[in-house]
Amino acid sequence: MDRTDAVSTLNELIETCRDGEQGFRTASEAVAEPDVQRLFASYAPQRAPFAVELARLAGSGLIILINSVGPASGDRGGDC
């Protein structure tokens, strides 16, 4: 995985975190059970710091660490 691929992957993860934040917020508003509302409402703001950290990694030299972790081929096996 080269730097461009890694940054692209991180950007996709950032978007996933943002989608998750909105999804949990929407779900908390859509369910009737108060305990489930609170649970989903508590999950929504957790996603923002994840996105911020991923953005920090995407813009820093730390991305190099991703290239040195895992099998040398870059293939972890399977279709994960």
Image: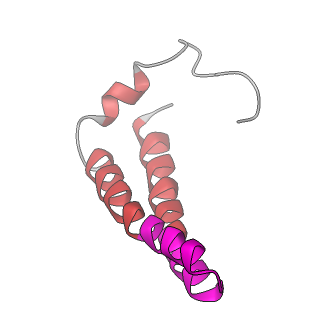
Q: As displayed, is residue 30 above or below residue 67?
A: below
Q: How many labels does the image show?
A: 0
Q: As displayed, is residue 36 above or below residue 14?
A: below
The residue drawn where x is 46% and y is 65% is 43
Q: Position of residue 7 (x, y in %)?
A: 42, 47
Q: Quarter holding the C terminus?
A: top right
Residue 46 visible = yes
Left or right for 53, reference 68: left
Q: Who is closer to the viewer here, 80 or 9?
A: 80
Q: Who is closer to the viewer here, 9 or 16?
A: 16
Res 45 quadrant in image: bottom left
The residue drawn where x is 50% and y is 54% is 13
Q: Does the magenta stretch include residue 72?
A: no
Residue occupying the far top of the picture = 72
Q: Where is residue 16 in the image (x, y as percent from the top left)?
A: 53, 61
The residue drawn where x is 59% and y is 72% is 36
Q: Who is closer to the viewer here, 43 or 50?
A: 43
Residue occupying the far right of the picture = 78
Q: Is the magenta stretch mostly helix, strand or loop?
A: helix
The residue drawn where x is 40% and y is 38% is 3
Q: As displayed, is residue 73 above or below residue 7?
A: above
Q: What stretch is highlighted in magenta?
A: 21-44
Residue 23 visible = no
